[in-house]
């Protein structure tokens, strides 16, 4: 089975025995929980579109391992066309869901781990790449959703992992056995973790020799004994428990984050992909971050398309669409959104092959892409809120709208233009609220700032990749200065 259907994907999650805590309770059935379910629906879209002939070119690829048709989220990029199609696929999925569809972290993780394990084996004589390819083959053939897990809690940022007051604030090896290793620690902000079949753990920063126990990468089943999840809160999340489908804004799709905890997790050696090779930890972090920063030039743009459309509809429903300042704001939103997309496409088109054969994006342009994502979606969201008007955050509830006595009053006084039902206006304003302030804001507004690393992390990489000395030489040559 190289391509699961969305129904087969959902059925496969029901077979997992995940240990998930949400709002202080252990959840028996994560698949059908009303807070979690919208995020699962977003992942299902990545499976459904792969079977849609209109979108199969973007959602599927040919495995370089088997020659079989596979989901692109399980694919290693073989050329710049693959890199570009990845961004186009992510934009499409953002348009279809208006939310985070969660499989990007796993796709970015396998592409980073592939080249780094290959280079480790070549230099050190290890067998990590062979193990990785075995896992990749299973991932492709079973069409698995894999959670790429990098970010550690980190504790005191001024101290390295080995000097933390609590050693578990960075994921680390606590015991090495003949048959495997024992791991403790946690991974924070784990996108889509509860909707994943497997996890692929990576180190969170470049390590030194003193931190070699923290230079760790491995794969494990998402429901392995010793792994538990604490579901993250989102703004307005309990609206999903109220019934109805208006107040939540985007009632069918969503995203999620979770704290992933390792409590003496046993990992057999065949699933270990790095264990103490600290000198390669920096390359793994850098490449994963680069791939994931490229991703934001696609997924955030797709959600931006939805937000721009919602803002335009709000203007229509408010009777303000012909106002020149409204037109100008919509133009600016489109300009900013396409700027993000241009960066995602540019870093893809400038990609180059690694030693293992898979393609790496241009790291400088990928970091420029993500640096723009830390800023421009905020302005897009501000303009959407401006166009929508204050009613976006002061509307009566859906229960009031449906109430036999006060419902007609709500419909009368929340009416926009007479030709559009009040409910349509309410729905589109709630969607804008969802993307800019509500649950989807986690995957759009806030994640634009901190996802794939903080703004300062990108600036550090831009400084490293910017080749300032070469630029000085260019200026000296033009100015006629000889050293």
Image: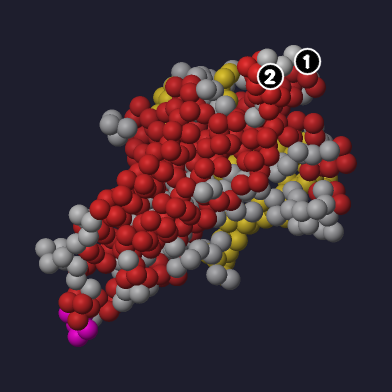
Please name the predominant secondary structure of the magenta segment in the image. loop
Question: Where does the magenta region start and end?
Answer: 404-408
Q: Which residue is mark 1?
A: 483
Relative placement, left or right, of 434 versus 268 is: left
Residue 407: say if magenta.
yes
Circle 1 residues within 10 Å: few <14, some 14–19, many ≥20: few
Relative placement, left or right, of 222 versus 181 is: left
Task: Kindly tell me whether residue 301 is visible in this rendering.
Answer: yes
Report which quarter residue 204 is drawn in: top right
Relative placement, left or right, of 168 versus 198 is: right
Sooner in the amino-acid sequence: mark 1 or mark 2: 2
Q: Secondary structure at mark 2?
A: helix
- The residue most toward the bottom is 405
Q: Are marks 1 and 2 in contact (CB under 8 Å)?
A: yes
Q: Position of residue 6 (x, y in %)?
A: 37, 43
Q: Split into 4 quadrants, where in the image is the C terminus?
A: top right
User: Residue 344, relative to residue 413: is it above or below?
Assistant: above
Q: Which residue is mark 2?
A: 476
Between the C-alphas of marks 1 and 2, the distance is 9 Å
Q: Split into 4 quadrants, where in the image is the N terminus?
A: top left
Q: Residue at x 43, y 25 (%)?
A: 61
């Amino acid at each position: 089975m190289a391509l699961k259907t969305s129904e087969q994907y959902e059925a496969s999650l029901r077979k997992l025995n995940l240990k998930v805590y949400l709002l202080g309770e252990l959840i028996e059935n994560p698949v059908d929980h009303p807070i979690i379910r919208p995020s699962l629906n977003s992942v299902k879209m990545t499976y459904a579109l792969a079977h849609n002939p209109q979108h199969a070119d973007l959602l599927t690829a040919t495995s370089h391992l088997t020659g079989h048709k596979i989901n692109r989220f399980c694919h290693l990029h073989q050329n710049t066309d693959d890199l570009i199609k990845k961004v186009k696929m992510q934009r499409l999925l953002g348009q279809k869901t208006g939310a985070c569809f969660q499989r990007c972290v796993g796709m970015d993780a396998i592409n980073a781990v592939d080249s780094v394990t290959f280079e480790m084996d070549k230099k050190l004589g290890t067998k990590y790449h062979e193990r990785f390819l075995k896992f990749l083959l299973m991932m492709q053939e079973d069409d698995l959703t894999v959670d790429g897990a990098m970010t550690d809690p980190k504790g005191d940022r001024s101290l390295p992992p080995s000097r933390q007051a609590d050693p578990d604030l960075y994921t680390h090896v606590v015991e090495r056995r003949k048959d495997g290793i024992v791991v403790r620690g946690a991974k924070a902000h784990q996108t889509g973790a509860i909707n994943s079949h497997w996890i692929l753990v990576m180190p969170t920063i470049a390590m030194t020799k003193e931190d070699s126990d923290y230079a760790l990468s491995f794969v494990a089943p998402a429901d392995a004994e010793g792994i538990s999840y604490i579901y993250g809160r989102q703004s307005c999340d309990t609206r999903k428990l109220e019934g109805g489908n208006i107040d939540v804004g985007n009632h069918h799709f969503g995203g999620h984050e979770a704290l992933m905890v390792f409590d003496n997790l046993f990992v057999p050696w065949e699933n270990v992909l790095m264990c103490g090779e600290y000198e390669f930890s920096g390359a793994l972090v850098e490449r994963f971050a680069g791939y994931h920063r490229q991703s934001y030039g696609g997924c955030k743009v797709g959600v931006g398309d939805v937000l721009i459309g919602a803002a335009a509809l709000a203007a229509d429903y408010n009777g303000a669409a012909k106002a020149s300042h409204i037109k100008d704001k919509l133009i600016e939103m489109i300009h900013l959104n396409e700027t993000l997309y241009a960066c995602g496409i540019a870093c893809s088109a400038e990609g180059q092959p690694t030693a293992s054969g898979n393609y790496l994006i241009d790291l400088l342009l990928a970091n420029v892409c993500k640096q723009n994502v830390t800023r421009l979606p905020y302005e897009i969201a501000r303009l959407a809120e401006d166009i929508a008007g204050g009613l976006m955050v002061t509307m009566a509830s859906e229960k009031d709208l449906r109430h036999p006595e006060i419902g007609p009053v709500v419909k009368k006084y929340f009416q926009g233009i007479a030709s559009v039902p009040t409910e349509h206006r309410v729905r589109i304003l709630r969607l804008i609220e969802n993307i800019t302030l509500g649950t989807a804001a986690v995957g759009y507004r806030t994640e634009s700032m901190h996802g794939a690393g903080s703004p300062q992390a990108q600036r550090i990489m831009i400084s490293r990749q910017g080749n300032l000395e070469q630029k000085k030489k260019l200026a000296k040559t033009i100015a006629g200065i000889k050293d």
